[in-house]
Amino acid sequence: MTAEPWALVDDVARHVGVAKDSAYLWIELRNLPPHKIGRLWKFNLSGVDEWVRAGGADGNYGGTVEKGGR
């Protein structure tokens, strides 16, 4: 079996159809499962899919995102 390739935050945001800022908020506030490799957050998209199916992206995550900010 081949290993699943790592995905970046941009890839995760595109995969689930949200803004990159939302993905960063999910990491901080909703326990989106990242792996820190050097300075970068990396993800297995299958893990992201499991997190979404388990309700990780449901509801209000307690923050707002202003234009240009993270």
Image (cartoon, helix red, strand yellow):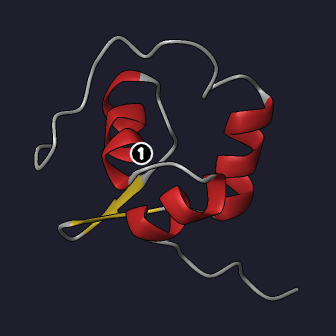
- The extreme right residue here reads 1
- The extreme front residue here reads 67
Residue 25, image quadrant: top left
In the rendering, at what x and y percent does residue 59 appear? Answer: 58, 13
Amino acid carrying label 1: it is Ala
Q: On the rendered structure, is 65 left or right of 6?
A: left
Position of 1 relative to 9 (above/below): below
In the rendering, at what x and y percent does residue 13 appear? Answer: 50, 57
Position of 9 relative to 21 (above/below): below
Position of 25 relative to 64 (above/below): below
Q: Nearer the viewer, residue 47 or 15?
A: 15
Residue 53, image quadrant: top right
Report the residue marked by disc 1.
Answer: 23
Residue 8, image quadrant: bottom left
Q: Quadrant of the C terminus?
A: top left
Residue at the spot 55% in from the left edge and 64% down from the top edge: 14
Q: Secondary structure at mark 1?
A: helix
- Tally of marks: 1
Position of 32 relative to 55 (above/below): below
Residue at the spot 45% in from the left edge and 50% down from the top edge: 34
Q: Residues within 10 Å of mark 1 (few under 14, many from 20)?
A: many
Q: Quadrant of the N terminus?
A: bottom right
Q: Nearer the viewer, residue 49 or 58?
A: 58
In the rendering, at what x and y percent does residue 24 appear? Answer: 32, 44
Q: On the rendered structure, is 44 left or right of 23?
A: right
- The extreme bottom residue here reads 2
Residue at the spot 60% in from the left edge and 28% down from the top edge: 57
